[in-house]
Image (cartoon, rainbow, N blue to C red):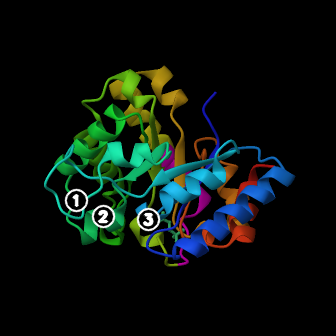
Amino acid sequence: MRKKIVAGNWKMNLNLQEGVALATELKDALAAEKPNCDVIICTPFIHLAKVADVVAGTVVGLGAENCADKEKGAFTGEVSAAQVKSTGAQYVILGHSERRQYYGETAAILKEKVNLALANGLKVIFCIGEVLEEREAGKQNEIVGAQLADSLFDLTEEQLANVILAYEPVWAIGTGKTASSDQAEDMHAFIRGVIAGRFGEAAAENISILYGGSCKPSNARELFSKPDVDGGLIGGASLKCADFKGIIDAWK
Ligand code: PGA
């Protein structure tokens, strides 16, 4: 059975003290009331080592929001997968649309990042999704299919077992405009079919596919009720413990 997951993506928010406080609040809330899904928080690099100490031995998993496409060396300002792993983090988000759009991350760069992350023992939360014009042109399947093929199709089935997918329609991210649960289900079922076509039915059945884009406590239950929606990748609503917990509780 594939995992149900709610993952937070803090993006470039919260200073170190605020991040530690939020992680502590979340850890305490989930200790008081055990979640029915896996819970992960993905934080800026600067939070990782401290938050790793806060969540060690709890149900809360920890991830980075990015890592370098190079192994090590003279790459000023970059953070490698091995460095992320050494903080105690277990996950890394790769391919987020903000990285693709604002930092020019191509499919080839992302392929390198995925390989390095997996080689260093991190699990990858790999994001895919179309922009508004692509959806309006009816090209969303073509775009998402290519994103999967171009960065993930050279993995082995064993490597794919350490990948979580996150479908995030770019037009729904931070806009308050959520995909309908039917739009999400259509795409998630398509994605699972693409994975089945390349890696086989078992791999497709086992991979978790999260929805992301203006997911909040008020719509999470409806989205998660769909058979191919295995949870959410949450931006804005992961910055307040009560909102994030409200989404986690949608699995109850
Ligand atoms: P949002 O972001 O929940 O703020 O829309 C989701 C994401 O970008 O992962």
**Label 1: few (<14), some or many (≥20) within 10 Å?**
some
| Residue 46 disc label | 3
Name the dominant secondary structure of the magenta segment: helix
Disc 3 residue crowd, few under 14, some 14–19, many 20+, Cα 10 Å:
few
Give the camera-side residue of 91 and 95.
91
Residue at x 39%, y 49% (from the top left corner): 84
The local secondary structure at tag 3 comes to helix
The residue that disc 1 covers is 105
- Identify the disc placed on residue 181: none
Q: Secondary structure at mark 2?
A: helix
Q: How far across and down, in percent of the image, does residue 211 sit?
A: 54, 55
Q: Is residue 43 left or right of residue 81?
A: right
Type of the residue with mark 3? Ile
Horizontal arrangement in the rendering, residue 183 relative to residue 195 (left or right): right
Instruction: Return the residue at label 2.
Output: 99
- Circle nearer the N terminus (1, 2): 2
Label 3 vs label 2, nearer the camera? 3
- Front-most of 22 and 50? 50
Q: Is residue 236 visible?
A: no
Relative horizontal placement of residue 27, taking residue 191 as reference (left or right): right
240, 233: nearer the viewer: 240
Q: Amino acid at mark 2?
A: Arg
**Residue 160: quarter of image:** top left
Tell me if residue 187 is in the magenta stretch. Answer: yes
Q: Is residue 209 depicted above or below 76 in this figure?
A: above
Q: Nearer the viewer, mark 1 or mark 3?
A: 3
Residue behind label 1 places its C-beta within 8 angstroms of ligand 1: no
